[in-house]
Amino acid sequence: MTRYRFDDLVAARSVAVIGASQDPGRIGGRPVHFLRQGGFRGAIYPINAKYAEVQGLRCYPDLASVPGPVDVAIVSVPARDVAGALAACGASGVKGAVVFSSGFGEVGAEGRALQAEIARLARETGVRVIGPNCQGVVAFHQRLNLSFSSAFVDGGEPGPVGLVVQSGAVGGMMAALLRERGVSFSYWISSGNEADVDVPECLEFLARDRHTRVIGAYVESIRDGRRLLDAVAAARAAGKPIVILRAGRSAQSARAAASHTGAMATEDRVAAALLAQVGATDARDVQELVDDLYAFARVEPPRGRRIAILSNSGGLGVIMADTCAHLGLELPTLPERAQQSLRAFLPSFGATGNPVDVTAQVLSDPTLLPRSLEVLLRADEIDLVVVALAMVNRMYPVDAIVRDLLGARSAAGKPVLVTWLASAPEGAGAINAAGLAVFTDATRCLSALAALASFAGAPPILTPPAPAPLAPETARMLAGAGPLDEFTSKAVLRACGVRTSEGRLVATVDEALAAARELGFPVALKACAIDLSHKSEDGLVKLGLTDPEAVRAAAADVEARLRARGPATEACRWLVERMAPPGVEVVVGAHRDPTFGPIVLVGLGGIFVEYLGDVAFGLAPLDRARATAMIHALRGYPLLAGARGRAPADEPALVDALVAVSELAWSARDRVAEIDVNPLIVQPRGQGAIAVDALVVTGRQASAGAAPVRAPGGP
């Protein structure tokens, strides 16, 4: 059996439309009309037993009656008949099928069963299925319109942007908005419920496609998170930016997405962090996705984040400077040599530091704009210039502005963006038609610019080395299912290279006293059992015990509290540990995400981390560079770096611990569900980091319905 690739579908030279309609306005009639009117040069075979002819073409009663080979079939029949149509496709050697029909995973148990049958047929026959419940595919360079979307009634010229959407209606809206701004497409793909072909496979195709330079995606569900990240990384390696808009970020929208495509959403913070890690631009709404794709299609990413603002309004420049600070864009003061050049011709009341204000004098002396722009583009300290023009109402001819902007940009070879605010509306259209990127909102312009700069300045994607297999003793400790007690959890961590507080497991007061004397005062005494998840809150942790009497009193209190909890914990043992020296409290952890597999986190705050919310996420396993980047991304990182005269913390030791936890999470991904090291005390530089509390939860990974967990960069 041959299992075709997406490439084979869009290279089709013959198309059958199963359920073809005589009416070009109906769903079954639109693809016939689109293919005929759009310049497709291959064979078109309408299939419908009701007709002898459809829209001027001979119509066939079934697929078996078609006289020639069929590369791709469009399926537009009731849901109950789709499986039979796909079986016929398999028998006829069809490479792919685009299923418009709805009534599957989005409508309940019966629909899910029908969708599962589609998936089975795709696997067994090799026919690649797009959909069901999709609006199809358009391959613009091939003039192949396998869609019924209203966005392409008039066809469309080929271009550089590939767009993949799980919702055809949303995708059509995005396409219409982009086309209004002069953006053309290489491919438009509506994947629908994804019984077979999914968003990651489409992104992989676009990453290697020679026609595609910029990629956009609208995602309502992520089934195989690792493959999605691999696809983004592949595009990044090919120099192609990917802008992704994810629905289902909130609980409310997740429920809406589930009712729409049968989707399930992952936690927003996790998905956002991991996508950023591989270089994706994470759009927050439709307008931002459209703006970012437009900017990427029009502007080469700059060398860095250093921008200059050139405006005819000083106030507008100040407002935009505030926005730059919010977006993390650098607005460097121009060097004195550049300012001297500007002062030579600008009015004395203009500004030359950055932003540069050419003042309203530009209306009476149009040379001020190109001369100022030339100075800014020549400055080595500037990577990109934003020209912000406000209230230019036909007093400064737009054709002259366009000529001046294009000339300066071509001479310097640096990007130029334009904001055209409260000015003659036809001006923005003229600037856009000339090939420049123009925005009628300054904040949207700078937000898109931040996306350009982030893509250009993102660090290279590294493939971490494969962690060593688990040692036999570690594998034995992880063989069960459920939480391990603190003593065993720490033993697992020590075996993997994480330093833990030194301690003894005891069962009596006398043993506790002996352990305390051996370890040396002060010590901590804790209850130790598998069902104690909130020991501190329940009074089962006693810290800073400085003498034998304190140990006796602590043990008696803990024993009484355990007895009050009932027989399940009466026989609980105690853990006596040497008190760790002071330092910065950090949490390090990992868990097995159902979408992305093992992920790791680091955060500041120790036991207060859930209230502070200062955490960063990464994909296991980590290398040292990525672990370091996660730590530096924390808002509270200055506490580790030595804020307000404090000694810098031992950051290399924290990196070591984070990498070790990530390697354990990956190596034991089929055994470990969760790792929680909280707090990890990071001591001053050179003194290390010590895990003073830890929890490891084991459990075999369920296989039914779960996406495969693959190593980063794996097949």
Image (cartoon, grey):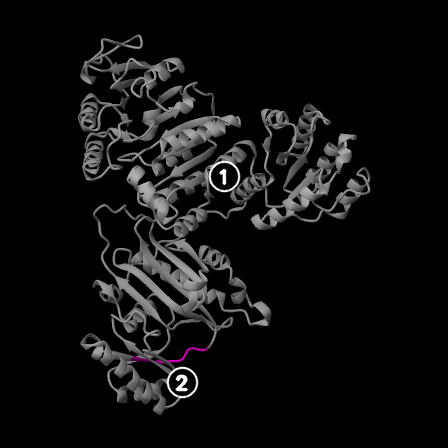
Left or right side of 116 for 280: right
- Report the front residue among 578 and 498: 578
Q: Which corner quadrant of the image does residue 370 belong to?
A: top right
Q: Which mark is residue 522?
A: 2
Where does label 1 land, which residue?
A: 288
Residue occupying image coordinates x 42% and y 61%? 602
- Which region shows up in magenta? 575-581
Mark 1, secondary structure of its residue = helix
Left or right side of 455 for 533: left
- Report the front residue among 560 and 96: 560
- Is residue 13 in view? no
Give the percent coordinates (x, y) of residue 687: 48, 73
Q: Earlier in the sequence, mark 2 or mark 1?
A: 1
- Is residue 624 in view? yes
Mark 2, secondary structure of its residue = loop
Structural crowding at the residue carrying mark 1, measured as other residues with C-alpha within 10 Å and reported as few (<14), some (14–19) or many (≥20): many
Decide whether residue 578 is among the magenta residues. Answer: yes
